[in-house]
Image (spheres, rainbow, N blue to C red):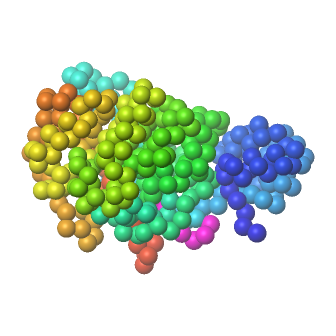
Amino acid sequence: MAYKSVFHVSAIKSEFENAGLNPNFIPLIWKHVLQNPNCVWDEIPSLPSAAYPLLHSKFKTSTSNVHSAVDSADQVTTKLLIKLQNGEFVEAVIMRYDSRLGQYDGKPRSGGPRSTLCVSSQVGCKMACNFCATGSMGFKSNLSSGEILEQLVHASRISAIRNVVFMGMGEPLNNYSAVVDAVRAMTASPFHLSPKKITISTVGIIHAINKLHKDLPSLNLAVSLHAPVQEIRCQIMPAARAFPLDKLMHALREYQTSSQQKIFIEYIMLDGVNDEEQHVHQLGKLLETFQVVVNLIPFNPIALSTYTTSNDQKVIKFQKILRNTYNIRTTVRKQMGQDISGACGQLVINKKSSLLTDIEDLSI
């Protein structure tokens, strides 16, 4: 019998309830494991006596391990290659920021150092976006909530994590139940992350967007739009054929009405594909009645891709038109971890070396 992760939310709750044990003991177990990585079950104090044989027979403190951790040259990004119990690999990326650096709206920023963790939700991805290395892997498997949470556990032992973004390998809303369970655990004891510090990115899985706010209120939603018209979206994101742009925008309208929250729009800048002046005006008109933040993402080169990234002048012009003509808040994503293949769109398993070549979307 394969043991399950103690952080596998639905599994441990179900086992406790079936054994007549109070699930309120589960956060105490998680806290002890977080603080004592090499603990054994009998060392956890104050549990009901029936809990110990159950834990011994069904669960492991971790079903994954950090196969490698690589730091970028500037030491602000750490890429974790994590080996799962079934022998597959996923990647998580820690990004360190100091919000006191620079200015916002002409004024000094407040705050201080913080770390954002980019987590994976699947091994591979079905979406096959042709600017993203993960898409070239195809889909292998969904991660359990335990395997998702273990990425946070591993990262927390390296850096204090304040933000989590579901922008690593996989389409989070195609693994809906496990992602929802993982997020609910992240916002509860012992992790205590604010839901406002967690972001789920999606290419636009409409049926899942329609129920997301009810299941995870206050969470941040990021949409990988990447083109202002359906024809271009289908060209660079084959899965967009199943999610027509007009129906996606209707779902986002309903989501915003119910949540009263800004939506983050991710837009990769591909030279000559989606970065011309006509495209920025199409995008502005598409979004001008929404409350959104548009994040322009320089394209990171990946193997076998014929795309090139837009030059700085094009990106700046694109940003200015969105801001000045359409009054849409627009940022340009700071690239982090390119030297360790830890930047947007580069996550892919190299089968020969079991190393990853990077991540689809990093946002804070």
Magenta-colored stretch includes residue 362: no
Q: Is residue 228 left or right of residue 83?
A: left
Q: Is residue 318 left or right of residue 118?
A: left
Q: Which residues are magenta?
A: 85-91
Q: Is residue 62 left or right of residue 200?
A: right
Picture coordinates of residue 202 (x, y %)? Answer: 41, 48
State whether residue 364 appears in this view.
no
In which quadrant will I find the C terminus? top left
**Vertically, is 178 above or below 259?**
below
Picture coordinates of residue 170 (x, y %)? Answer: 45, 58
Q: Nearer the viewer, residue 219 or 214?
A: 214
**Vertically, is 91 above or below 263?**
below
For the view shown, which residue lies furthest in the bottom direction? 352
For the view shown, which residue lies furthest in the top direction? 107
Residue at left offset 63%, top offset 53% = 146
Give the quadrant of residue 216: top right
